[in-house]
Amino acid sequence: MSRVRIVLIYQSLLGIYGDRGNALVLAKRLEWRGIDHELVIVEPGQVIPADAHVYLLGGGEDMAQISAVKAIRADGNLFRGVDAGAVVFAVCAGYQICGTSFTVGDHEEVIDGLGLLDVTTRRGPQRAVGEILTSWSRPDGPVSLITGFENHGGFTTLGPDAAPLAHVEIGVGNAGDGTEGAVQGRVIGTYPHGPVLARNPELADHVLSLALGRDLEPLPSGEIDRLRSERITHVRSGRR
Ligand code: GLN
């Protein structure tokens, strides 16, 4: 692979929760390892590159997410990129739009999603707001904790083709059913903001390893570990 291309889709629509930080984390972790890369930020009206290695989608407000799904479908290149083997990492509204359908807010109208994940999202009984802590069984074996914060009114149900990304210790996750996020092939959807890849470097490296098709050498993580353990102790102490 010559240059790793990360594409962050539609910050003006899916940017209000700071999930742009996920793109910066991936770029930084590649830079620290001396791996050639570029970060492309695409806005509505611009063409989404079809040849990315990683596509990132973030959280956004209800109406913005409807605009985003329509524009992504009309563009078509995200589908081409996924067909060519790209990884998709999508958070909250981004996760919901990767599913087969969703509703938003008080609108019961069902909107078609992108169909990249076998999940559906409907308005939940109450908004899920607060810190979330989950355990993620990494494909290479060990279990890692994922910390972040969630803020969503949509509750997500997985179909048979999607597997949960993680299991909830504290918080709501997909629908208060103990599962969080979804994985299907190389598409990953998840609810936590934070940005989640800043709070959880092992998840960031998992995304990069999938994209590069190889394991990555570990990076020093002292400061991040300290902040993580502070955050995990805090959320477990019940102060949400
Ligand atoms: N609008 C969606 C919901 O409330 C997504 C919110 C978000 O991205 N944080 O379910």
Image (cartoon, helix red, strand yellow):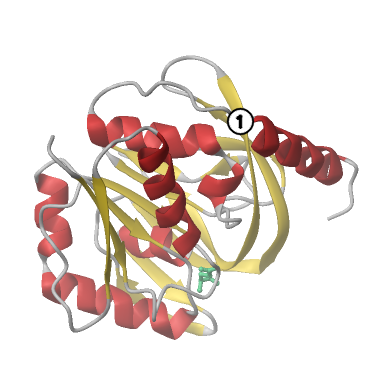
Residue 164 seen anywhere in this rendered image of the structure: no
| Position of 76 relative to 26 (above/below) | below
Where's residue 16, x and y in %?
52, 75
Which residue position holds label 1?
Answer: 221
Q: Residue at x 16, y 67 (%)?
A: 48
Q: Quadrant of the N terminus?
A: top left
Q: Is residue 3 above or below residue 22?
A: above
Which residue: 9% across, 44% down? 84
- Which sits in the foreground, 62 or 106? 62
Residue 169 as seen in the image, left or right of residue 81? right
Front one among 115 and 125: 115
The amino acid type found where label 1 is placed reads Ser
Q: Nearer the viewer, residue 139 or 167?
A: 139
Q: Secondary structure at mark 1?
A: loop
Q: Could you tell whether 49 is left or right of 193 in the image?
A: left
Residue under the point 12% across and 38% down: 2
Name, please, the residue furthest toward the top: 141
Q: Picture quarter containing residue 139?
A: top left
Q: Is residue 191 left or right of residue 183?
A: right
Pinpoint residue 29: horizontal percent, then vertical percent. 42, 40
Task: Give percent across and percent down for residue 224.
Answer: 65, 38
